[in-house]
Image (cartoon, rainbow, N blue to C red):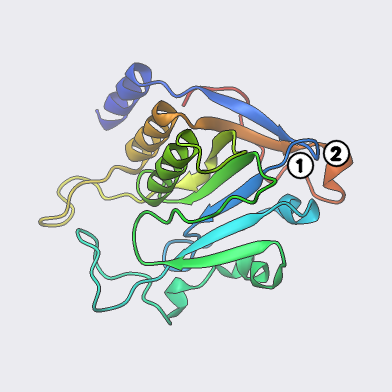
Amino acid sequence: MVQQIIELIEEELPVLQMSLVLTGDVKAGLVLVDIVNGFCTVGAGNFFLCTKWPVFASLDSHHLDIHEPPYPPHCIAGTDEAKLVPALQWLENEANVTLRRKDCIDGFLGSVEKDGSNILFVGICIDICVLDFVCTTLSARNRGFLVPLEDVIVYSHGCATFDIPANTYKDVVAHPQELMHHIGLHVAEGRGAKVMSQVSFDAKDSGDVSQSGLSSTDGDSE
C-alpha cells in the first residue's frame, strides 16, 4: 500500500531529471550541504578540485543552549558529529574549498565565486537543509544578488534524507524517506532548480578523475 501511494504521488508530481556534463568551458561551483558524521558516512569525487572550481561545504554545528525545534540535539559544536565525514576531511586542506559552520537549517551564505555561473548541490537532507539552501540561492539569483549565476542544479542521487515511519515515535512527525526525497526534488524543481540524475565529466577536462563516481540513470523522472 505504501509503495502504491508513493508511485501515485510520483506520477502526479513528476520530477524531470536530466543529465549534466561538466566541462572546463563553463564555470561551476559545488555546494556540499551537511555531509558530516552526525548524518552520514559517504565519499565524493574530486573533479572540482582538479579544475580549481570553487567548493563550498556547510557543516551543521549547533550549541547545546540553542535549540532547533522540532529536531533533537544533533551535530553539537566541538564533537565528532560536527566534523566532515572521514572520506571528505581532506577538503579541509584544499585552497579552493570554503568550509562554513552553520547553526540553522538554511545555510545560505556567499557561496558563489565571481567567475561562477552554475552551482551544483549535493547533501543532506534534500527536503530540509538542501532545499532551504537551494531556494534561498534561487531567490538571491532572481533578485540579481549573485551575478553571473545562471543555473542552480540539484544532483538527485547525491542527496539523501532520513526515514521515520508513521507511529514510530510518540509526538514525532512521520518522515517516509523515499516519499520525502521525491517531494524535496519536486519542490526544488518547482522553485526553478534543475534536477540532474546523471553528472559526468568531459574526459579532456577531468584528468585522472573517473567519470563513474556521479553517474546514474540518464534522463528519467523519479
Query: Are dots 2 and 1 in contact, CB under 8 Å?
Result: yes
Q: Which mark is residue 211?
A: 1
Q: Name the side, left or right, on which 163 lies relative to 166.
A: right
Residue 96: quadrant of the picture: bottom right
Q: Residue at 35% of width from left, 33% of height from top?
A: 183
Within 10 Å of disc 1 (Cα), the crowding (few <14, some 14-19, many 20+) is some
Which mark sits nearer the N-terminus, 2 or 1? 2
The reply to whether residue 203 is in sight is yes
Q: Which mark is residue 53?
A: none
The amino acid pointed to by label 1 is Gln
From what the image shows, is residue 124 above or below residue 195?
Answer: below
From what the image shows, is residue 110 above or below residue 138?
Answer: below
The reply to whether residue 42 is in sight is no
Q: Position of residue 147 (x, y in %)?
A: 59, 40
Q: Residue at 59% of width from left, 25% of height from top?
A: 18
Q: How many labels, in total? A: 2
Residue occupied by mark 2: 203
Q: For the view shown, which residue lies furthest in the top direction?
A: 12
Q: Name the side, left or right, on which 200 lies relative to 62.
A: right
Q: For the view shown, which residue lies furthest in the left direction?
A: 171
In front of the other: label 2 or label 1? 2
Real-space Cα distance between discs 2 and 1? 8 Å
Q: Name the side, left or right, on which 150 lies relative to 190.
A: right
Q: Residue at 14% of width from left, 49% of height from top?
A: 167
From what the image shows, is residue 125 above or below residue 187?
Answer: below
SS at circle 1: loop
